[in-house]
Structures are given as structure tokens and as C-alpha cells.
């Protein structure tokens, strides 16, 4: 049973059974793995239930974010073993006076400037999935990793055709990145166990909607098997540091 099944009405089931949505597009030949915003800002600074996490981190997802990070770490082991580029996103550093946040604060009533999430370490990526020197880190100020960043230039340099998306939150930064990648004609995949959201219904129904129209929602096992099946050295020419990292690990 898909994670979204419990949230669909009978009418929804009948409609989508007849529309043809949700056909699997499949992976391409040159994937990258993207880790979206798996930082303290969205996960909280410790593994704890979400209802505890949001008392201090209003955007924190608590244990669901930390559990997803564990699964992402498993995926990264396979990706790095095959020399697949890993691209991270996290937030830009904020001005102390809050200027430049745009409309972020307008949709949240908890605007306390002394909140712990304003700490200098808020954008730090969780240790379980911390970037390695050969990885790419994109700093962003808006939901999509594409908006106002060099991501598209990096993907062109890599000659990538597939983006495997992980991270959070499913209904926000993950979804917007998926839609933008789809709009640029990349094959998009979202790894179910490697994504998270503060809302259970939001998580499930956004996975459903992305799978219906913009991406393949795939399992961790399926994604690991796909990455393991790829030939070694796909990106050696574009990113020699990936190959060097592989060689270095082989001699440890």
C-alpha cells in the first residue's frame, strides 16, 4: 500500500484510475543525488518527537527528519561507491536584523527573533549526512534549490539527466525543486523513505501528487539497486575529485 492511500477518497481513487496519471518515467543514465535542507533548521538539533522539537525550532520536524537522514546516509554510501555526484542545499546566512527574508515571516505567527533556530548553526547539515569535500553545497534563500542559485549550471557541467531528490520538507522545498527540475526536462525521482515533512498528510499527499505528475516516487531499495547497477566512472571526466575520493577510500 502506498503511503498516500489512507488519505485518498473513493472519488480520488476512481478519478486517478481513469486519468492515466502516475505512469513511471524511469531513471536516466546520468543521475545526481540531491539532499535538500537536512539541517538543524528543519530537523531540530537533536533526535526528539516533533511535538517537542517545534517548541524550540518552529520549522523543525524532529525525529521524522532524523530518521530520514539515517536512510539518506544509507543511500549516499551506494552513490559515493559508484562515483555519483551528491548535491546538497541549505539556507543562506541571515542578516541579524532579518532584512531580506521576503515573505517567509508573513506565514508564521512565531516571529520571536530570539528563537534558537536563529543560531549560527541552524543551517548546519546533520552529521549523519554531512557533505564530503568532493560534494557540492548550494546555498539558497527560497524553497526551490534552482531559484537564484547556480544549480542548473552545475547540472549542465555534469551532463546530468536525472535528479534523485531526498530531504525536506516534502510539501515545500522538495516539491518545488521537483517541479522546477521537471520543468527543465530532468527525470525526477523522489525517494520515499528519504523525505520528511512536519505534516503526515502533507507528506503523503505531496508524494502522491508528485508521483502523479512530476516525478517517480521510488523506494530506497529500488534506488540503491539502480545506483549499484550503473557503470563506474560515469562522472570521472566532469568531476575528477569523485574518482580520487573513490581511490582514497579503497586504500583506507
Image (cartoon, grey):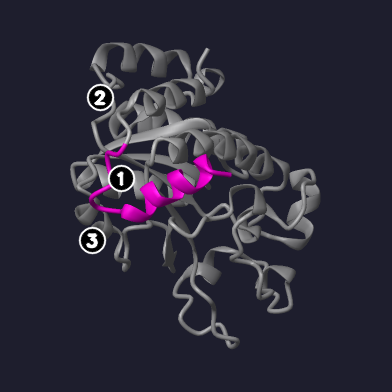
Locate residue 91, reporting x and y percent: 50, 66
What residue occupies the far bottom of the structure in this picture? 97
Q: Is residue 149 left or right of residue 67?
A: left
Image quadrant assignment for residue 147: bottom left
Which of the two marks, 3 or 1, is nearer to us in this view? 3
- Residue shown at the point (59%, 66%) measured from the top left: 123
Q: Magenta segment, which residues?
A: 233-252
Disc sitting over residue 207 in the figure:
none
Query: Quick one: label 3, few (<14), some, or many (20+) residues within 10 Å?
Result: few
Q: Which residue does the image show at 32% across and 66% down from the upper left?
A: 149
**Which residue is tagged 1?**
179
Q: Position of residue 122 (x, y in %)?
A: 64, 67
Q: Secondary structure at mark 2?
A: loop
Q: Measure the C-alpha gap from mark 2 to mark 1.
A: 15 Å
Please indicate whether residue 193 sits to the left or right of residue 115 in the image: left
Most extreme residue toward the front is 251
Percent across and percent down for residue 155 are 25, 53
User: Which residue position is annotated with label 3?
Assistant: 153
Q: Describe the element under mark 3 as helix, strand or loop.
A: helix
Residue 222: percent from the left, percent from the top?
Answer: 44, 20
Q: Of marks 3 and 1, which one's residue comes earlier in the chain?
A: 3
Give the residue number, with chain letter if any, for mark 2: 25
Q: Nearer the viewer, residue 162 or 176?
A: 162
Dot 2 surroundings within 10 Å: few (below 14), some, or many (20 or more)?
A: few
Q: Determine the residue positioned at 54% across, 79% down.
A: 94
- 244 drawn magenta: yes
Q: Residue at x 27, y 58 (%)?
A: 154
Q: Are marks 3 and 2 in contact (CB under 8 Å)?
A: no
* Quadrant of the snapshot with the C terminus: top right
Amino acid at each position: 500500500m502506498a503511503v498516500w492511500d489512507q488519505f485518498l477518497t473513493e472519488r480520488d481513487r476512481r478519478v486517478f484510475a481513469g486519468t492515466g496519471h502516475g505512469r513511471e518515467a524511469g531513471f536516466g543514465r546520468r543521475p545526481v543525488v540531491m539532499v535538500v535542507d537536512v539541517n538543524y533548521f528543519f530537523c531540530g538539533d537533536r533526535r526528539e518527537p516533533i511535538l517537542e522539537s517545534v517548541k524550540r525550532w518552529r520549522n523543525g520536524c524532529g525525529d521524522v527528519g532524523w530518521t530520514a537522514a539515517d536512510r539518506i546516509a544509507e543511500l549516499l554510501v551506494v552513490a559515493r561507491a559508484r562515483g555519483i555526484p551528491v548535491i546538497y542545499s541549505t539556507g543562506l546566512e541571515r542578516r541579524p536584523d532579518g532584512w531580506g527574508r521576503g515573505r517567509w515571516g508573513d506565514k508564521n505567527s512565531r516571529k520571536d527573533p530570539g528563537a534558537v533556530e536563529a543560531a549560527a548553526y541552524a543551517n548546519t547539515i546533520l552529521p549523519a549526512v554531512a557533505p564530503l569535500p568532493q560534494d557540492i553545497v548550494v546555498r539558497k534563500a527560497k524553497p526551490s534549490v534552482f531559484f537564484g542559485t547556480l544549480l542548473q549550471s552545475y547540472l549542465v557541467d555534469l551532463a546530468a539527466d536525472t535528479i534523485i531528490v531526498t530531504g525536506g520538507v516534502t510539501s515545500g522545498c522538495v516539491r518545488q525543486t521537483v517541479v522546477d527540475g521537471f520543468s527543465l526536462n530532468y527525470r525526477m525521482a523522489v525517494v520515499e523513505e528519504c523525505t520528511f515533512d512536519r505534516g503526515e498528510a502533507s507528506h503523503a499527499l505531496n508524494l502522491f501528487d508528485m508521483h502523479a505528475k512530476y516525478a517517480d516516487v521510488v523506494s530506497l531499495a529500488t534506488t540503491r539497486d539502480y545506483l549499484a547497477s550503473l557503470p563506474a566512472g560515469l562522472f570521472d571526466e566532469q568531476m575528477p575529485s569523485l574518482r580520487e575520493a573513490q581511490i582514497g577510500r579503497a586504500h583506507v
